[in-house]
Image: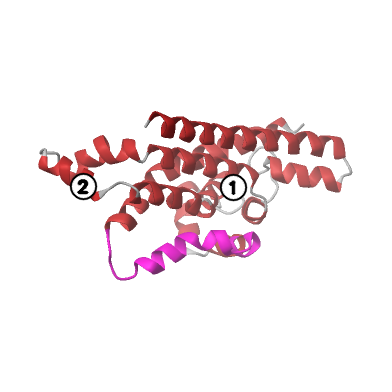
Amino acid sequence: MDWQAFEVSIMLAVLTCLSLLPIGLALAYLLVKSNFMGRGIIEAIITLPLVLPPTVLGYFLLVGMDNDSFLGSVFVSLTGQSLAFSFAGLWFASIIYSLPFAVQPMMRALEKIEPEIREAAWCSGLSKWRTFFKIELPLAWPGIITAMVLCFSHTLGEFGVVLMIGGNIAGETRTLSIAIYDSVLAFEHQQAQTMSLILLAIALVTISVVYSFNRTRVLRF
């Protein structure tokens, strides 16, 4: 068992979820509340990671993180290190490829809130921001929990983008999915099986918790 790769995977998944919580909420709220020109294009861009092959997405992200690119050059000037093949680059890439898993469940949850509820809150004297935090956010909580679990599980098991962006640097960019691949190539099938079962167990437990949480909430109401 590669515990170092396990630690990198968990850290990457947690940081990605923490980053996508505010980003996903902001994008979901904007897309649900606004009807502006180009909304369809923004939704399509957010959804692209779901339909693009991971290697294609990884290639474009790798090009965007090159030291000669704007993003890569800014990162080098600030840190003195390359963004590609680093944990920071892997973190940034994880936010991009897990974005639709955060935004879409949050959008569906916000869309289910009846307009009359918001109007009643406004008539009671609540501002739009207080209505969001006191009324809409609690009502959308099941969708937010679902989004975070999906992001966590997806980030934990991603392989193609991780390999393209992070490579295979032990202790920095080598995740469990990469370690499983290496173990298979080295004919270490017992180790590969152990790590695969761990990923399977984590995914099963997290998704089961979400279903149980949502079912309990529905029964209460």
User: Which x, y percent locates residue 85?
Assistant: 62, 51
* SS of the residue under disc 1: loop
Q: Quadrant of residue 117?
A: top left
Q: What residue is pinned by disc 1? A: 86
Query: Is residue 66 rendered magenta in the image?
Result: no
Residue type (three-letter) at the residue carrying disc 2: Glu
Q: What residue is pinned by disc 2? A: 116
Q: Is residue 144 left or right of residue 161?
A: left
Q: Is residue 44 left or right of residue 162?
A: left
Q: Main secondary structure of the magenta part?
A: helix
Q: How is the image coloured?
A: secondary structure
Residue beneath the point at 50% across and 50% down: 101
User: Which x, y percent locates residue 177?
Assistant: 70, 44
User: Which x, y percent locates residue 160?
Assistant: 67, 55
Mark whose residue sits in front, 1 or 2: 2
Query: Is residue 56 rendered magenta in the image?
Result: yes
Instruction: Name the foreground residue: 94 vs 69.
Output: 94
User: Which x, y percent locates residue 66?
Assistant: 55, 61
Tell me where the magenta segment starts and ends, as one range.
34-57
Residue beneath the point at 54% across and 31% down: 209
Instruction: Name the foreground residue: 23 vs 129.
Output: 129
**Disc 1: CA contacts within 10 A as few (<14), some (14-19) or many (>=20):** some
In the displayed structure, would residue 132 be above or below residue 212? Answer: below
**Disc 2: CA contacts within 10 A as few (<14), some (14-19) or many (>=20):** few
Q: Is residue 214 left or right of residue 115?
A: right
Q: Earlier in the sequence, mark 1 or mark 2?
A: 1
Residue 67: tell me if it is visible: no
